[in-house]
Image (tube, rainbow, N blue to C red):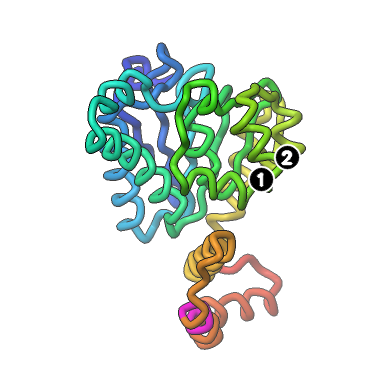
Amino acid sequence: MSQAAETASTPLLDIDGARATIRLNRPKHLNRLQPDDLDALLKLFDRIEADAAIRVLVLTGTGRAFSAGYDLNSVAERATSAVEERSAGSAFEVVVNRLEDLGVPTICRLNGGVYGGSTDLALACDFRIGVDSAEMFMPAARLGLHYYKSGIRRYVSRLGADNARKLFLTAQKIGAAEMLRIGYLTAMVPAEALDEEVDRLATILAGNAPVAMRGMKRAINEFARGQLDEDAADRRARDSMRGAEIKEGIKAFAEKRPPKF
């Protein structure tokens, strides 16, 4: 762990070539998210979107857990009035939805347990690679909290209604093997292989055509929500047939070399 990461802070950003890494950084509290963290994440997402050189984002945590979710004390403080309650829920929801809608492909590096709202934060990433000791649970029913609708939709669209029921209504903890079985994890690896597996996938994603990936990611998310903009998807497909990416892709294929997008 770097010296900068030893002291609790808002999320840290590291950019290495085409790869950006955001690290949640409150390890003593299992990277429990505070209001300041939400503001910081939105700013980091904007920075990543504005940098055309960034082709992939990795989201991870410092220490032994990915994240314990949103600070319950902050939620309780904002539950004193209907207006404050609405703003508290929407602030976290805005961050998670913003992550899901990022144009670059995203990988959640699950270095440990993921709990509460952070289960949705990870689910908003395109891929989730976790250690075989990981675990997760969604305690909303145990806390008397009706979860926000976009989070429930994400659970249902990505994991299926039966798995969403099990996780939300029983509020029971599940381990990495079950997380992999239901599709929450894209891959499960021993701790010592986590970085290698994340690096392998990040390298693949960073090497693919960014404009084509951005458009297809948008279409996939819209299909999952039942809100496909058919005209926009058709337009992107037509544009890709005469764009620079397909010319380079076809040329590279013919020359038996990796494309340079």
Q: Is residue 19 above or below residue 230?
A: above
Instruction: Say which quadrant the N terminus sits in.
Output: top left
- Report the residue at 36% width, 15% height from top: 6
Is the stretch drawn in magenta largely helix, strand or loop? helix
- Report the residue at 35% width, 56% height from top: 49
- Judged from this view, the residue extending furthest toward the top is 28
- Closer to the camera, 212 or 259? 212
The residue that mark 2 highlights is: 182
- Closer to the camera, 3 or 82? 82
- Report the residue at 41% width, 11% height from top: 28
Magenta residues span 232-236
Q: Amino acid at mark 2?
A: Ile
Q: Is residue 116 visible?
A: yes
What label sits on residue 159 in the rendered view? 1
- Closer to the camera, 7 or 222? 222
In terms of secondary structure, where does tag 1 sit? Answer: helix
Q: Are marks 1 and 2 in contact (CB under 8 Å)?
A: yes
In terms of secondary structure, where does tag 2 sit? Answer: loop
Q: Is residue 186 above or below residue 110?
A: below
